[in-house]
Amino acid sequence: MLGTFLLWFGWYGFNAGGSISIDADLALPVMSSAVVNSTLAGAAGSITALFTNLIIQERLTGEPTYRLSSAMNGSLAGLAA
């Protein structure tokens, strides 16, 4: 779990850091857009993977269980997409 949070934090530097070489007037809007998009992509991937795994496990075992590892993998998939 700690590794996922470290990678997510590093993604902000990677995505927002790419706007440093842009014109000074456009740097702030592009940087803020990159940070917001990174946050929403990671969160959406995490929630989607968590509930997809919940539905699959409930269908297979009859008992719904939440797996945090699925949410962490989903957040990384959302960040990479």
Image (cartoon, rainbow, N blue to C red):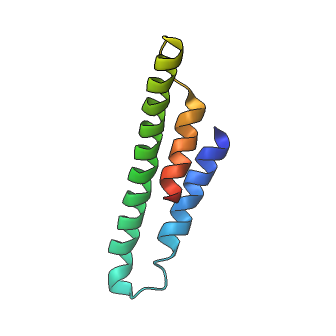
Identify the residue at horizontal 45%, vertical 78% (top origin): 19
Left or right: 9 in relation to 43: right
Residue occupying the far front of the picture: 60
Residue occupying the far right of the picture: 3
In which quadrant will I find the N terminus?
A: top right
Point out residue 49 in the picture as x, y percentages from the top left corner.
48, 37
> For this rendering, which residue is in front, 77 or 28?
77
Q: Is residue 63 above or below residue 77?
A: above
Left or right: 2 in relation to 24: right
> For this rendering, which residue is in front, 67 or 61?
61
Point out residue 70 in the picture as x, y percentages from the top left corner.
56, 34
Count of picture labels: 0
Point out residue 69 in the picture as x, y percentages from the top left corner.
60, 33
Identify the residue at horizontal 55%, vertical 67% (top origin): 14
Residue 4 in which image quadrant: top right
Residue occupying the far top of the picture: 62
Identify the residue at horizontal 47%, vertical 40% (top origin): 46
> For this rendering, which residue is in front, 8 or 66?
66
Q: Is residue 26 above or below residue 57?
A: below
Point out residue 53 in the picture as x, y percentages from the top left corner.
50, 29
Identify the residue at horizontal 53%, vertical 50% (top origin): 77
> For this rendering, which residue is in front, 49 or 1?
49
Q: Is residue 57 above or below residue 12?
A: above
Residue occupying the far bottom of the picture: 23
Left or right: 72 in relation to 64: right
